[in-house]
Every structure is written in structure tokens, then in C-alpha cells.
Amino acid sequence: MPVTQVVADWKSLGEMKNGLLSRIFSKFADAIARDLELAPDVIEARKIVIEITAKPVRDTDTQELDSVDVQIAVGHKMPKRALTARMMVKNNGRQRSFVFNEDFPDEPDQQPLPFTDQEGEAE
């Protein structure tokens, strides 16, 4: 039975190995789309990166080109997110940890405000 050789192009690469490359690309596109919806205020670009590398494989006898090892790597880049909050160090005798004020993340010593959540009136 003759060997079926397929020309490597965008369509055939997407179909190779049961569509693995297409599925990876779709997952990354979905991740970027979700990130854009969740953080439209982050103006840095999101990227899908496809890197194709080709490495020669030489015939051991003739040292001529025998075949090519091709690697197709798909990755994505999204802006890093950072959260900054002022915290304090708490030592419980055995271990130290960082603690923060749930109501006032930037003010670890801030006392609760003197009104109830439901009524908004002073107690």
C-alpha cells in the first residue's frame, strides 16, 4: 500500500493528529476572549503565539538530509495581574503569616464602621 503524503499547510496542520492543534488553538482563543471580557480595563494585548521549528535529520550513511523534525508549539500570553494590599504579620507562636482587613484591604488596623449593614444607621 503506498504512503499518503500530505502537504503541510494551515488546513492540514490543523487536522493532523485528529485536530489536536486546532483544539489547542481554540482553547487559547477561548481563554483570551474570556480574559478580555473579565478585564476590559487591562489595555495590554493578549497573544496567541504559534512557533514552528524545523530541525534536519541526516542519513547516518550519506550525511544527506533524510527528513525533518518539525515542532509546532502553540502558546498564549496574557497580561499579568497584580493585587496590592497592605497587610500585617501575625505570629501565633509557631508560625508567622500575613493578615489583612477583609473590610478595608489597604488599612489593616481600621475598625468597623459604627452602623449596621442592613439599615445604614448608627447603632
Image: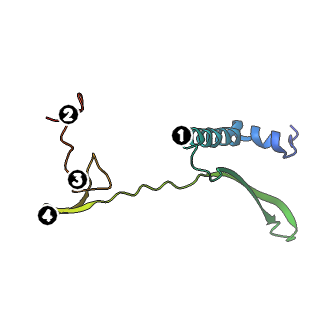
Residue type, label 4: Arg
Q: For the residues marked 4 and 2, what is the alpha-carbon distance in whole angstroms?
A: 36 Å
Label 3 sits on a secondary structure element that is loop
Asked if residue 99 lies left or right of residue 62, the reply is left
Label 1 sits on a secondary structure element that is helix
Residue type, label 1: Leu
> To which residue does mark 2 refer?
116
Horizontal and vertical percent position of residue 113: 21, 43
The residue at the point 88 percent across, 45 percent down is 7
Mark closer to the chain start, 3 or 1: 1
> To which residue does mark 1 refer?
38
* Badge 3 density bin: few <14, some 14–19, many ≥20, Cα 10 Å: few
Label 4 sits on a secondary structure element that is loop
Q: For the residues marked 2 and 3, what is the alpha-carbon distance in whole angstroms?
A: 16 Å
Q: Mark 4 or mark 2: which is in front? A: 2
Mark closer to the chain start, 2 or 1: 1
- In the rendered structure, find residue 94 and report the number of the disc placed on it: 4
Mark closer to the chain start, 3 or 4: 4
Mark closer to the chain start, 4 or 1: 1
- In the rendered structure, find residue 112 and report the number of the disc placed on it: none
Q: Mark 3 or mark 1: which is in front? A: 3
Mark closer to the chain start, 2 or 3: 3
